[in-house]
Amino acid sequence: MKSVMKKIYIALIILFLYAPIGTLIVLSFNESRTRAKWGGFTFQWYVSLFQNEEILRALLNTLLIAFLSSLAATVVGTVACIAMMSMKRRTKSILMGITNIPMLNADIVTGISLMLLYISLGIRFGIGTILLSHITFNIPYVILSVMPRVKQLNLSTYEAALDLGASHLNAFFKVVLPDLMPGILSGFLMAFTMSLDDFIITHFTKGVGVDTLSTKIYTEIKKGIKPEMYALSALIFITVLTLLILINLSPADKNKGSV
Amino acid sequence: MGKHRMYNAKYTVITLALLSASVLCGCGSTDKGVNGQVIVYNWGEYIDPEAIRMFEEESGIKVIYDEFETNESMYPKVESGAVAYDIACPSDYMISRMIQNGMLSEIDYSKIPNAKKNIGAQYFDQSRGFDPDNKYAIPYCWGTVGILYNKTMVDEPITRWEQLWDEKYADNILMQDSVRDAFMVAEKLNGYSMNTLDLNELTVAKNSLIKQKPLIQAYVVDQVRDKMIGGEAAVGVIYSGEAIYTQRENSDLVYVIPEEGTNVWIDSWVILKNAPNKENAEKFIDFMCREDIALMNFEYITYSTPNDAARALIEDDDIRNSEIAFPDLSLYDNLETYVYLGEEGDSLYNELWKEVKAY
Amino acid sequence: MTSKSKWLSTPYLLWSAIFIIVPLGMVFYYGLTDKTGAFTLNNIIAITSAGHAKALRLSLLLSFASTIICFVLAYPLAMILANLKVKRHNFIILIFILPMWMNFLLRTLAWQTLLEKTGVINHVLSFFHLPALKIINTPAAIILGMVYNFLPFMILPLYNALAKIDTNVINAAHDLGANNFYTFIRIILPLSVPGIISGITMVFIPALTTFVISSLLGGGKLLLIGDVIEQEFTRTSDWNLGSGLSMVLMIFILINMILSSVFDKEGEGSML
């Protein structure tokens, strides 16, 4: 009985999170160009999506920026968390406070101030400037995900590894890192997600002609979201979901997983 | 357990790395055309992409195209010089601000022959409100702000702003969520200029808006279109450019220019002072003023074109003679164009609008 | 470890100096000057004006409410997930992150489609002859939007913290005669404090500064402080006022900083 309740609870939350996604997928088959009216079933947006070079290029830019920026943020953020472990509590709180600033600041403030920074440093606007900005606002998400793990870290195993003759680096990779991994992974995913979604900071720090999906979607507001965008969202969703299921159901994984 | 997690993490990372690698190969360098390039900054979805392709082919000039979503987000970007744009397409009041701040370069009409040839003189006249000598701006799109109503949801035809204060339509009214447009409605309701800086008049207008607030279903910007099509509200304040499209989707919708008068807005091409490719910019604007290209753009974006030669080419009589898309401006004596109110005027309006919104 | 750690923090210190502190300095500069560049406190005092104060109060109220709702929804979920016997933890995490891979604006617009008077949910309700749901354009819709958008930020840190708790500790408590409730209060809850703090920070702060949600789901009738700041920058180009108000919001970082350092002590203390 209890486990049934648990399952129902999980299912309800998942329904809540996925209801709008379902709506988007339904809209991608809507023949009418407006979300307010059902004009009949069509596949045409999926066809025109693949003829739309701009959207495809924006998609590639988005993925590239999200991947590289979250990777960099994960490395810097994780290292910072470990470093903070041995700091005095006050120093640590101050640093954590600084870390929260990019999250708290209105995006537009971060965006404009970064733009001014790049101009004063004479950096050429392009994918590079977007990357730097995304790394900046991604780091806090990594730190906030990894920090709880670091705090719960049991240092005695690390010390035991050292006593047993492991080098610092070795002990770190063999003992500490696996413990932190879930936090690091969720930090990476969080960063990746935030980067995918960002519009305002990208808008102010992008070079000319470089577009991501969000900047394209936001500029489409004035004339209405193109149904191709719904189609693309649906495709991304289905692809990632399939990928996830495949990875998690592969037999190799099960063997490994039992270790 | 730990290993298991590592393994999955690695897997995810590798998949994403492959994805990204394909991206790196995908994005080519922005190679210049044989005749150089031109950098254009326009509203999102405000041009037929085919028109750009044709221009590149005919002129050998590579177009680098960038989009913005509000005049206000365009301005700091151009001002900062982060990117040296050649051409932008702001609205009237923003153009006057850019003129005042010396950001625009004078148009050499001899290099853009199609402008005076094809674009109706009345639109240049209308532009004088923000560009007194027609020195800087060439009209690209224009329209009015009016009321869109659903004839199945109202008892009588809507003809006046006044009716947006009618309690019959409580929770069925959509207002524009922007300072100038909202105040324009209230100012016209009370018979004032939409560019007034008179504190008494503005207070009256503000009080009208506060009085109206309980009747409003929502203050929206671009969702008026979809909400009206879906029958979510009975009346809404909307740009005329959306009228043709919304009527096509829902034939119960009617667009009117209210009797009290309204705003005529014009988005125009301007060449920026520090344009690195001025000659190419002139060629681009001239190309966009060509009648066949202007027609293509009109059909793509459905916002009214000031290009009379292009209008003559529209095949559908209903659209060519549409009172909505092409109202005869000379028939109205209470239409106005926004002008830049200066920093103090702007902040006064904003202060009052915030009082309305927070009320 | 200590000497090494100092060196380890260098990249992040450098990074935050250049990309956080310097831009922050610019915000302070704009916030403390007027358009002519002269020093003024007006942009900060502006928070006391009726409209701004009301917007701030409303933002605090709504973000507080959505943080609590997120916590109440997420904690049991995180506990269930952390105790799952399956070996697919990453898969489970991803299930809760995946919705956020769809564009924020598209998702929020989708909620509009769902909640509207003539929307999907009301169609379904009227089909079953149930009364219509009338929450679109109300504060409830804004809270729903906030909870929807920020719930994953609460689930993940909680899950991370709870999954890390050694089941032996819990078994030991049971062996020593503690009932479920007592075990939860004395063992599980204290051990998950770091996750709770992360979760609250990651929900409350973004909710406090959010702006699109209120205009899309709240009908633009309620002004939140995030909307005010956003408009100062994007619509009215008053960077000085926008920056001044942002500085006021930073007070909440300070509060957060202090609170987390207070609770941290307990959190770490209970580890011993």
Image (spheres, helix red, strand yellow):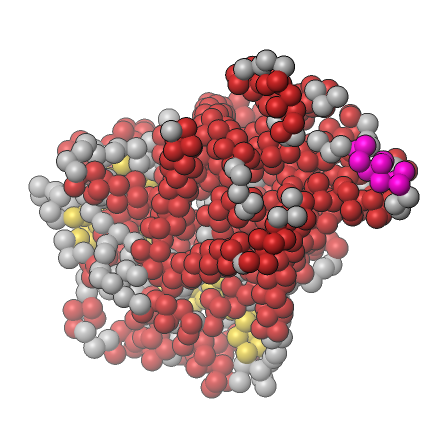
What's the magenta region?
A155-164
Q: Name the residue nearer the viewer: B16 or A48.
A: B16
* Quarter containing the N terminus of chain B: top right
Q: From the viewer's perspective, is residue B342 above or below residue B107?
A: above
Q: Which residue is drawn at 72% across and 23% down?
A: C271
Q: Where is residue A251 in the image (x, y as percent from the top left)?
A: 55, 58
Q: Position of residue B87 (x, y in %)?
A: 52, 67
Residue B158 is one of the magenta-drawn residues: no
Residue C138 can be seen in this image: yes
Q: Residue at x 42, y 61 (%)?
A: A235
Q: Where is residue C64 in the image (x, y as percent from the top left)?
A: 49, 25
Q: From the viewer's perspective, is residue C116 above or below residue B274?
A: above
- Answer with left or right where residue A217 lies relative to residue A106: left
Q: Name the residue nearer the viewer: A227 or A241.
A: A241
Q: Where is residue B30 in the image (x, y as percent from the top left)?
A: 60, 75
Residue B83 can be seen in this image: no
Q: Which residue is drawn at 84% across and 48% down?
A: A170
Q: Name the residue nearer the viewer: A74 or A45.
A: A74
- Answer with left or right where residue A184 lies relative to residue A157: left
